[in-house]
Image: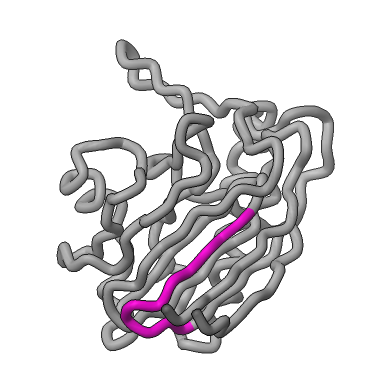
């Protein structure tokens, strides 16, 4: 295999890259990663949580599942999940950001987002993904709701309420995807304010098989 890129994104920053069909993306971390992708030929064909859940019949993204676009086209397939058996990858919660933090503070609900009394950053995953996608002309409002890798949610089947958990990898583990077409991929190394460890760095590797 030929290594195309091997980089580390610091906590609470964004990262992006173009990929060719068939190339492999390996993300390794022990923190939440807000991850999105777009068809390189049509950025309107972005990852969409709803058709992805409908096709897999599952609330979580699992090994073997495809990430589908708004039009139902397969963009990427998860081919290896180092978090399997430890926790799940969320496809419901959306992403943190300046607007969510401000609204939670105004509603007196900021404690739902924090593990302890920590300083809330002035930006989060929404801003990180927007900055990462800016060179391709993708605006804030066109960033789709991501798959939240390593974000293990507790879902009450009776009430439908979602709650964060402290389940994270004890050491960096990989999640590996195969590009099913030419893509733009991007992620945010989440500030992960709900975690006892806070946000951490994310390693990203793209290889050509």
Magenta span of residues: 18-28
Q: Of residues 152 and 194, which is closer to you in this image?
A: 152
Q: Residue 104: horizontal and vertical position, in percent?
A: 61, 37
Q: Is residue 163 left or right of residue 11?
A: left
Residue 68 inside the magenta-drawn segment: no
* Residue 192 shown left or right of residue 148 in the figure: right
In the image, residue 184 lies at what x, y percent? 42, 79
The residue at the point 73 percent across, 29 percent down is 115
Q: Residue at x 52, y 80 (%)?
A: 17
The secondary structure making up most of the magenta span is strand
Taking the spot 38% from the left edge, 16% from the top edge, the residue there is 156
Residue 141 in picture, x, y percent from top left? 42, 68
Q: Which of the 4 image quarters holds residue 72?
A: bottom left
Q: Depth check: 7 or 11 in front?
A: 7
- Is residue 198 depicted above or below 44 in this figure? above
Q: Is residue 104 left or right of residue 63?
A: right
Q: Looking at the rendering, in which quadrant would you find the C terminus?
A: bottom left
Question: Is residue 27 shown above or below 172?
Answer: below
Q: Residue 200: x, y in percent?
A: 74, 51
Vertical comparison of 134 with 173: above or below: below
Q: Residue at x 31, y 69 (%)?
A: 46
- Residue 24 sits inside the magenta stretch: yes
Q: Which quarter of the picture shows residue 14?
A: bottom right
The type of colouring in the image is one colour
Instruction: Name the residue furthest front.
Output: 1
Disc tally is: 0
In front of the other: 162 or 154: 154
């Amino acid at each position: 295999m030929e290594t195309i890129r091997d980089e580390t994104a610091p906590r609470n920053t964004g990262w992006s890259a173009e990929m060719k069909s068939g190339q492999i993306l390996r993300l390794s971390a022990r923190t939440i990663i807000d991850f999105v992708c777009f068809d390189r030929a049509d950025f309107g064909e972005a990852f969409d949580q709803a058709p992805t859940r409908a096709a897999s019949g599952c609330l979580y993204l699992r090994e073997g599942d495809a990430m589908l676009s708004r039009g139902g086209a397969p963009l990427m397939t998860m081919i290896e999940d180092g978090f399997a058996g430890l926790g799940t990858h969320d496809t419901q919660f959306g992403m943190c950001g300046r607007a969510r933090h401000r609204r939670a503070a105004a509603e007196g609900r900021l404690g739902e987002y924090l593990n302890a009394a920590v300083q809330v950053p002035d930006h989060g995953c929404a801003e990180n993904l927007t900055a990462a996608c800016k060179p391709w002309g993708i605006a804030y409002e066109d960033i789709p709701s991501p798959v939240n890798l390593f974000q293990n949610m507790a879902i009450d089947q009776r009430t439908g309420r979602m709650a964060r958990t402290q389940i994270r990898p004890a050491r960096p583990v990989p999640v590996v995807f195969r590009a099913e077409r030419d893509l733009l991929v991007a992620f945010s190394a989440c500030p992960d304010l709900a975690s006892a460890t806070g946000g951490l760095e994310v390693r990203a590797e793209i290889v050509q098989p």
